[in-house]
Amino acid sequence: MLFLGLFVLILAKEAMADVNCNPDLASNKLSLDEIRDSLIRQEDTIVFCLIERAKFPLNPKLYHRNHGFTGSLVEFIVRETEAIQAKAGRYENPEENAFFPEHLPRPLVHPRKYPKVLHPSGASINMNKPIWDFYFNKFLPLLVADGDDGNYAATAASDLACLQALSRRIHCGKYVAEVKFRDAPHEYEPPIRSQERDSLMKLLTFEAVEEMVKKRVEKKARVFGQEVTLNNTVDGGKYKIDPLLAARLYDEWVMPLTKEVEVEYLLRRLE
Amino acid sequence: MLFLGLFVLILAKEAMADVNCNPDLASNKLSLDEIRDSLIRQEDTIVFCLIERAKFPLNPKLYHRNHGFTGSLVEFIVRETEAIQAKAGRYENPEENAFFPEHLPRPLVHPRKYPKVLHPSGASINMNKPIWDFYFNKFLPLLVADGDDGNYAATAASDLACLQALSRRIHCGKYVAEVKFRDAPHEYEPPIRSQERDSLMKLLTFEAVEEMVKKRVEKKARVFGQEVTLNNTVDGGKYKIDPLLAARLYDEWVMPLTKEVEVEYLLRRLE
């Protein structure tokens, strides 16, 4: 049993190379396979975050603009938490984009040198405004129950975790676009030169892949959102979030916004 | 399909009553069944947090005391994040205990009125010092790989999520103790009057239940930590964290510290 445990632990520890979309610092290589592994791992994070947010009801007071702050309570908490994380160097990582990027404090720790693999014009794309809007205005009311349980701080921390996970996933589109461009510049250069948004979107769209992603996310919501008891050996059909809603999140917002990032990135790729 | 989705959604939204250990505000009732449901739901949260922390290597720089702060970088991030959450009223909830409770700012929002079900002497118990110590010094090195990937802010946010989930679970011991005392005061009063720690510990220990909890947590780590693909129908035997380590976390630290909270609470229950 101890040996088995050790073996599993080694496996678990080896499976960790797929956190980042940006390339391995040592090799500086950027491959579509690695980015895909990272995107697949990020699905788990996103589903966990949704399940955790759904523990709380809507808690609408968080989103009202009547607390005497500039903006809502959730804006206050996100802005202040981002400021702390900026001090710890979060936004030095080109995969991370702040929701309130204005006036972020400088890192207090010596920032890591991230390899510059992204084209500078595209690296600065920040899609967090539409992410914020769809998350709070469209998606959240579908995810959670109505009501107010007073757990505002915990709920807002949970919202921030969801937003950061979604933002990271969607902005990985920059890396997807960069590697696709490098792999086939002859395909991308003509529509980039003529700034044809629709042609680029068509080049980047693979419906069969998107269907597969939606199905996998739905399955993850089912597996991670099930009630695990010692007796059940099969999924009891009762889930903490609606698996179809997780698929819809990807269908309506995550995948379209990722492609939007990719298109925006490519449009600037030859600047 | 739409109807099925709606049905599942309703189920999911109904399943949310088990977030809190403290009683339903409307009914002011406190039952052991409800507390148990909450503790079981919190296992999922804890396992999710561990899986997310294990995405990152140890990142030891977070824990060194050489950044020019008072304390380590992780201390700085936890202290500052707790201060923001205090402003949003987190610590008005008697289930929440801060890791740096000194000088917490006052809430900026009108705090909710939580029912006073805990005995005042026991309500102030804070076990976060031993939680912090075992988490960083004993548990974390077993959970994560060695190494430094520079994601300090994200790693610290992940540590904080783990710490808060563990703290909440362990401090629920106050509610467990209160309800057990109320259910059988004649059993608890003699050892409380004679301040017999060991007798109280014996009254609170049910080995069969503890075995079941460990098994269930291990199973949750297996279910939630598996690699979900569209093809696999059975668990592929590869996990993001070692399931036995999750069980060990409960065995060596979570359950003993919860009982420690219960004993401390009871020792003060007749003050």
Image: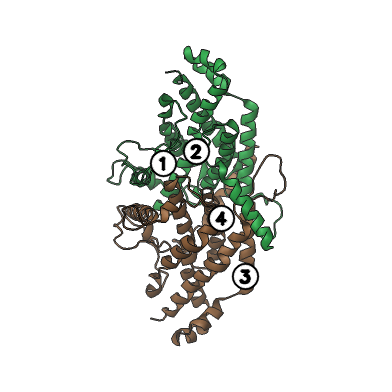
Chain colours: A green, B brown
The amino acid type found where label 1 is placed reads Arg
Residue at the image position 56 percent from the left and 24 percent from the top:
A180
In this rendering, the label closer to the viewer, 3 or 1: 1
Which of the two labelled residues, at mark 2 and mark 1, occupies the earlier sequence position? 2
Which of the two labelled residues, at mark 3 and mark 4, occupies the earlier sequence position? 4
Report the Cα–Cα distance between label 3 and label 1. Answer: 47 Å
Instruction: Work out whether disc 3 and disc 4 sit on a shared chain.
Output: yes
Instruction: Work out whether disc 2 and disc 1 sit on a shared chain.
Output: yes
- Callout 3 crowding tier (Cα within 10 Å): few <14, some 14–19, many ≥20: few
Chain for disc number 1: A
Chain for disc number 3: B
Say which quadrant the C terminus of chain B sits in: bottom left
Chain for disc number 2: A
Dots 2 and 1: beta carbons under 8 Å? yes
The amino acid type found where label 4 is placed reads Val
In this rendering, the label closer to the viewer, 2 or 4: 2
Residue labelled with disc 3? B209
Residue labelled with disc 4? B47
Residue labelled with disc 1? A112
Report the Cα–Cα distance between label 3 and label 2. Answer: 47 Å
Residue A95 falls left or right of residue B87: right
Residue at the image position 59 percent from the left and 60 percent from the top:
B245
Residue labelled with disc 2? A25
Q: Secondary structure at mark 1?
A: loop
